[in-house]
Image (spheres, coloured by chain):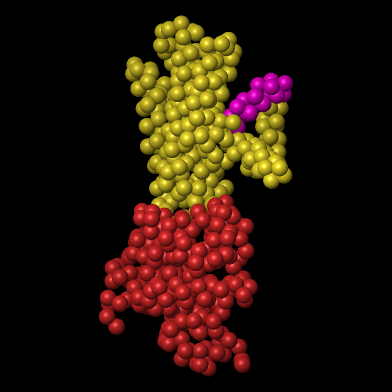
Amino acid sequence: MSTGNVKLSAENLQAAYGDVQVLWDVSLTVERGEMVCIVGSNGAGKSTFLRCASGLLGTKGGRLLVDGQDMAGASPEAFLRRKVAHVPEGRRLFRAMSVRDNLLMGAYLRDDAAEVRQDLEKVYEIFPILAERRDQYGGTLSGGEQQMCAIGRGIMSRPELLMIDELSLGLAPRAVELLITALQTIRRSGTAILLIEQDVMTALELTERAYVMDRGRVVKAGASAAMADDPAIRDAYMGQL
Amino acid sequence: MKPWLWLVVFVAACALVPVFGNNYALRLATIMCLYAGLALSWNFIGGMAGYPSFAAAAFFGLGAYVSAVLQSKGLPIGVTWAAAGLGATVFAALIGMAILHLKGHYFAIASLAVVEVLREVVNTAEDLTGGGMGMNIPLPGMPVDVQARLFFFAMLTMTVLLLAVTIVVSRSKLGFGLRCISQNEDAADILGIDTTFYKVAAFCLSAFGVAVIGAIYASWVQYIEPPDVFDILYSVKPLVMVLLGGLGTIFGPVIGAVIYLALEELVWRNFLTVHAAVLGGLIVALVLFLPNGIGAVIRDRTKRAAVRS
């Protein structure tokens, strides 16, 4: 594995909220164009890791590299300029802004207006329902549509790595299917995806590699397919079959 | 282009007052511009950024005292007004960096504390400010009616300037950024908006406007004392006006100021002893029945009429 191929890499990362340490020695990599998931129970530190990897939370130790560059103390803006985009848990749309404006806000740091318009059309192609709802307020969308809009907003920054926190939480199965199809489309365009997903079976089916986190540490890492067959994982996260 | 057209109409209407109106009308028009200026200033931080600031009275008093102290040292009146604005801007930047990471009620309380602290500082600094005795500001030495006109046009100029800045900001990247912050600050962060800088910028704009208006006010009334210019009502009134007119809108604050002044003139003097209760009742009614201001009600009506026809 050459370093030139690695988009995001954490080495023994430590993170804390105030005095409470949440991440312990987390090491994780995502290569360009790769689809990786982090699974684990509530409070395992998955979302905290994403907050670190998008600059929302400062790290307390270890290293966090994007394209081989140390990102210690970098702002969310710096991460976005290095083409790492974050779709946060709970969607977090601008409720009193139209769907179109929400999507355009994703391109806030870009100044290539013509290409932004093209990318907007691409988002509408991936999520046709958003084109229909383009003038509606973000707050009036259904849960699944909001998630589509949040992911669309994420790709409007033209990321090389898209990190999605809790893709399917609280959504109808039909909406989740649409989202998964969309992720595969986004993936085919060459964007790497780091997915946090509480539905372990779906996550392992969708991705090539997986990390299992527990109480702030990575306890297992490997190929998703192998992990899906691992009896220990099946016991812990999928129940007896 | 439409907002600029309305701005010209507003200026023309106001400029006619000294030509046709009597002294009472001129005084009322001056207060209207003062109120509109305060409301427009508060709108940057409270309306656009969604941070419920109660610091307006602090900036008002600070502006009044900076200008008064400099005037007593013999500086020209216009220079002291500019110095008041710049001083308050720097002060707001420092305070803003300290308290703008707080949200909601916590920010409101912290901004309220700024008023109390400044008032105590001014009370204590007797050598400079005369403390509780207040300050007499030397007269510019001109006829009373000319003075009245001068201060009216000064207030009007400041209001027009703030209105122009509002129009520019609301269409700029700063305006979009502030609206994003008010709707969802986490999302704004994630999209690469420098939220700290934007919030401080909004706070500074707000401080600048309020402080210059405070400075003009001090020159106008020619006597200031801490309880007068650090009166918490200077924090509450702009908030009520902006809520009345419409949060984060361009002309809402001006419309709100006009309605508020009308209420004050018509109702207040009939309820002199309970005017604070009336103000409280008004705030409650606003929150319950007009959460988006009068502007939104008018917009909804016209929309519904359009749908029906």
In the image, what residue occupies the spot 43% across and 62% down?
A119
The quarter of the picture where residue A84 lies is bottom left
Labels in figure, total = 0
Q: Which quarter of the rendered picture does the N terminus of chain A lie within?
A: bottom left
Q: Colour of chain A?
A: red
Q: Position of residue B198 (x, y in %)?
A: 42, 47
Q: Position of residue B15 (x, y in %)?
A: 50, 18
Q: Which quarter of the rendered picture does the C terminus of chain A lie within?
A: bottom right
Highlighted range, magenta: B256-271
- The residue at the far top in this view is B143
Is residue B206 visible in the rendered image? The answer is no
Q: Position of residue A145 (x, y in %)?
A: 58, 65
In the image, what residue occupies the spot 43% across and 51% down?
B195
The quarter of the picture where residue B201 lies is top left
- The answer to which of B57 and A154 lies nearer the viewer is A154
Q: Considering the whole magenta stretch, tell me its main secondary structure.
A: helix
Q: Is residue B227 above or below residue A46?
A: above
Which chain is depicted yellow?
Answer: B
The quarter of the picture where residue B227 lies is top right
Q: Is residue B266 magenta?
A: yes
Is residue A171 visible in the rendered image? The answer is yes
Q: Position of residue B216 (x, y in %)?
A: 45, 22
In the image, what residue occupies the spot 52% across and 37% down?
B250
| Horizontal side of residue B153 vs A13, given as left or right | right
- The answer to which of B36 and B303 lies nearer the viewer is B303
Q: Is residue A241 above or below residue B42?
A: below
Q: Is residue A193 magenta?
A: no
In the image, what residue occupies the spot 61% across and 65% down?
A143
